[in-house]
Image (cartoon, helix red, strand yellow):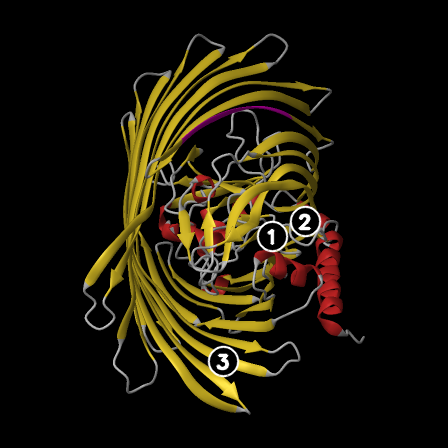
């Protein structure tokens, strides 16, 4: 068979994966039905995602599903789950995007509760959360009324280890090797116990994350003649330290108190050198060399308490308090020179300080009514405070002496939420369940910058309905309808001006009058259990989104470029199909695979043409095989991840982003029941991230827009970025 062109190859590959997913549902079921599940589930045997009992659509993955590939962070774990992509630099997995949607569309929870973020876009960088702290991960596709409605794309709930996770101790030592022969280490220790009426867990981990990258940027005339080339050498070097403790105390036969504390500290150094050549008549002429160093210190902690008790035989009351805080400092020094033998000159000096904290209080009562109806009502209250200060220094180019300070890019936000909900659930007609809910969310926000202050408030009434029907022990149908919200990020709201964004000479100014995006979503899913161990799921979804927030060009920037702002640019729709399969091929061999096909539609505010939502991939897939050799106490396996192309449109450019696939393998050797030696390798195919730019020129925003609409391209650009392969040797011990 001849497969021509990248689009045909993509369609062919997607079709093959779909065929594997669908055809495997019925295969080998009879051969597995007689096996004893308890005897199969031992160390080294295939581990699959968990089957959930919730009425709403959700996927659950225990840490065992990820552990064989030795992920260093939650980002490394999530890249293997259905429908989650990343648009970060190659080799890094920081802000997950459910259903391929950009930052802010995915909500991140820890133990079911909101957490602050260092970024203004409300996106939580999960690569800062060590995998060693995690007990399980839930992928919530459509929320119930007792869950925050934030998250049009969906919600990821990261559940941390507690005293009930396991009993005893464990330790890990790891060594990582990179293509440039650099070595980095990692280590972790955890211990859990259960004494009388108390269960407890303590853990600590240290890991060094290292990402060396190489990028080439090539710029061309519209006829394809290359005019400039830039080489960028970039190294990201991070140290993460985490501490975690959990205590669960049985106050009585009907009451429990759960206390938890988690701390993560990240120290990160980024060093980037750019060398630019102009090309004339095929000859490379050195134009400029720049050197930029960034030091980042980030500390975050979460403390919480949950009290649960029974009020009579049919009523349960739970109340909780949670405080979280993240502080981040980012210092940047930029140098430049025109030739190798020229002296370095100071080109820039800036400091970014961010503090983001949130207090969350919840209380709820769950009551069983006559007829098997469960009724839950509750109130959630929170107060978020965010302070962000970007200080740019004017420096003497020779000495670096500070000559002036720009403090205008500073803002403070206080956001208060008061949410109430009512949720009812009932069973009927032999294994059918219906859940109806209503959540009311009121937000008041005060944002100030220098002498400007804006106060806004908004209230959303978000209904939800979830229905599930178990036809038998193996087959379940789910239908869900829910209203969700995406709130603007803080820089989009702040009236401050960001200079040199998105390009040198441009600027961006926030819009305090932005409205929240609101989505009405539908999910229809079917799930089939395969011999009680394997599982197949398929889910179709649709989201109708109003008041979509996008960049708009509003005038001329102080630097002579374009002044951008943000506006509710219009309405759009998102839809897709999600399939996942976890299947034992034999007692010792397991297959996991998932495929998500995505599409969306919105009218571009610049060109008037229809396109997909910004940064949304058109497909995402993962598959892998694990195999156990019991007589050798050895296991091995591989995992492959790939996401499709995405598009981003600005007034002066169109950007197409594509990633190569990532191949990972592991081999593990077990020594008895208590020791494991594991060798893993990732990015074995030397994956590249490629961005293609169509740039449009003009002397004014109106002229640039006219050239964009008429596709009069002023410059073509291609960026090709690659990162190192990583080989990891890990030793684990249990005691």
User: Total marks drawn?
Assistant: 3
| Nearer to me, 370 or 262 | 262
Which of the 4 image quadrants contains residue 348?
A: bottom left
Please state which of the two labelled residues, at mark 1 or mark 2, is closer to the viewer. Answer: 1
Q: CA distance from mark 3 to mark 2?
A: 42 Å
**Residue 153 appearing in the image:** no
Q: Is residue 237 above or below residue 324?
A: below
Report the residue marked by disc 2.
Answer: 579
Q: Position of residue 112 (x, y in %)?
A: 45, 33
Q: Position of residue 30 (x, y in %)?
A: 72, 48
The local crowd at label 3, few if under 14, some if 14 to 19, many if 20 or more residues have their Cα within 10 Å, is many
Disc 1 on helix, strand or loop? Answer: loop
**Residue 38 appearing in the image:** yes
Residue 460 is inside the magenta segment? yes
Write the start and end of the magenta stretch as one range: 454-464
Q: Which residue lies at the image location 25% right of the left edge and 81% below the top edge?
A: 343
Label 1 or label 2, whichever comes before in sequence order:
2
Q: Is residue 164 above or below residue 713?
A: above
Disc 2 on helix, strand or loop? Answer: strand
Please state which of the two labelled residues, at mark 3 or mark 1, is closer to the viewer. Answer: 3
Report the residue marked by disc 1.
Answer: 614
Residue 528 is inside the magenta segment? no
From the image, give the main secondary structure of the stretch colored magenta: strand
Q: CA distance from mark 1 to mark 2?
A: 23 Å
Report the residue marked by disc 3.
Answer: 229
Q: Position of residue 604 (x, y in %)?
A: 67, 50
Q: CA distance from mark 3 to mark 1?
A: 27 Å
């Amino acid at each position: 068979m001849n497969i021509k062109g990248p689009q045909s190859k993509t369609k062919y590959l997607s079709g093959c994966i779909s065929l594997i997913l669908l055809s495997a549902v019925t295969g080998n079921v009879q051969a597995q039905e007689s096996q004893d599940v308890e005897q199969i589930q031992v160390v080294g045997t295939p581990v699959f995602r968990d089957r959930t009992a919730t009425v709403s659509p959700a996927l659950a993955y225990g840490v065992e599903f990820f552990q064989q590939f030795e992920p260093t962070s939650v980002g490394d774990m999530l890249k293997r789950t259905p429908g989650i992509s990343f648009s970060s630099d190659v080799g890094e997995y920081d802000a997950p995007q459910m259903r391929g949607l950009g930052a802010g569309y995915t909500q991140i929870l820890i133990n079911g509760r909101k957490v602050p973020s260092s970024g203004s876009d409300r996106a939580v960088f999960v690569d800062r959360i060590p995998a060693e702290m995690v007990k399980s991960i839930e992928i919530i596709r459509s929320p119930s009324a007792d869950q925050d409605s934030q998250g049009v794309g969906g919600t990821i709930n990261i559940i941390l280890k507690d005293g009930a996770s396991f009993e005893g101790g464990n330790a890990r030592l790891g060594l990582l090797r990179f293509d440039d022969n650099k070595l980095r280490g990692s280590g972790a220790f955890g211990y859990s116990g259960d004494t009388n009426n108390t269960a407890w867990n303590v853990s600590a981990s240290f890991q060094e994350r290292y990402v060396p990258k190489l990028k080439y940027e090539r710029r061309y005339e519209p006829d394809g003649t290359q005019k400039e080339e830039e080489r960028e050498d970039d190294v990201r070097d991070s140290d993460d330290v985490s501490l975690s403790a959990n205590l669960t105390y049985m106050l009585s036969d009907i009451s429990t108190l759960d206390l938890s504390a988690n701390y993560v500290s990240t120290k990160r150094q980024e060093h980037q050198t750019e060398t630019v050549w102009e090309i004339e008549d095929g000859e490379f002429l050195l134009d400029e060399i720049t050197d930029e160093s960034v030091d980042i210190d980030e500390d975050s902690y979460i403390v919480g308490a949950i009290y649960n008790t029974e009020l009579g035989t049919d009523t349960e009351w739970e109340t909780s308090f949670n405080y979280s805080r993240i502080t981040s400092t980012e210092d940047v020094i930029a140098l430049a020179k025109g030739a190798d033998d020229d002296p370095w000159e100071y080109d820039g000096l800036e400091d970014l300080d961010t503090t983001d904290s949130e207090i969350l209080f919840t209380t709820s009562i769950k009551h069983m009514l006559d007829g098997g109806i469960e009724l839950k009502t509750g109130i959630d209250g929170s107060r978020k405070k965010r302070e962000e200060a970007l200080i740019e220094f004017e420096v003497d180019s020779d000495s670096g002496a500070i000559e002036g300070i720009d403090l205008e890019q500073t803002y403070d936000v206080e956001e208060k939420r008061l949410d109430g909900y009512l949720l009812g659930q009932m069973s009927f007609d032999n294994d059918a369940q219906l859940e109806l809910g209503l959540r009311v969310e009121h937000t008041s926000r005060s944002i100030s910058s220098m002498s400007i202050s804006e106060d806004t408030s908004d209230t959303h009434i978000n209904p939800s309905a979830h229905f599930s029907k178990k036809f038998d022990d193996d087959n379940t149908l789910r239908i869900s309808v829910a209203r969700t919200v995406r709130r603007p990020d803080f820089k989009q709201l702040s009236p401050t001006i960001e200079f040199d964004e998105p390009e040198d000479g441009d600027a961006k100014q926030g819009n305090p009058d932005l409205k929240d995006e609101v989505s009405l979503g539908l999910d229809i899913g079917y799930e089939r259990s395969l011999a009680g161990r394997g599982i197949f799921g398929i889910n179709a979804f649709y989201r109708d989104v109003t008041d979509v927030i996008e960049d708009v060009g509003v005038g001329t920037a102080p630097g002579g470029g374009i002044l951008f702002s943000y506006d509710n640019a219009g309405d759009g729709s998102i839809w897709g199909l999600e399939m996942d399969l976890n299947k034992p091929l034999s007692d010792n061999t397991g297959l996991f695979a998932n495929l998500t096909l995505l599409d969306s539609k919105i009218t571009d505010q610049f060109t008037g043409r229809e396109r997909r939502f910004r940064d949304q991939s058109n497909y995402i897939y993962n598959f892998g095989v694990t195999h156990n050799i019991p007589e050798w106490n050895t296991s091995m396996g591989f995992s492959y991840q790939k996401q499709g192309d995405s598009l981003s449109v600005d007034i002066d450019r169109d950007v197409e982003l594509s990633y190569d696939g990532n191949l990972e393998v592991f081999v593990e050797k077990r020594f008895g029941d208590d020791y494991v030696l594991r060798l893993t390798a990732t990015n074995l195919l030397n994956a590249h991230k490629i961005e293609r730019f169509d740039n449009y020129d003009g002397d004014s925003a109106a002229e640039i827009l006219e050239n964009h609409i008429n596709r009069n391209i002023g410059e073509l650009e291609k960026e090709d970025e690659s990162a190192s392969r990583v080989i990891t040797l890990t030793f684990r011990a249990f005691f």
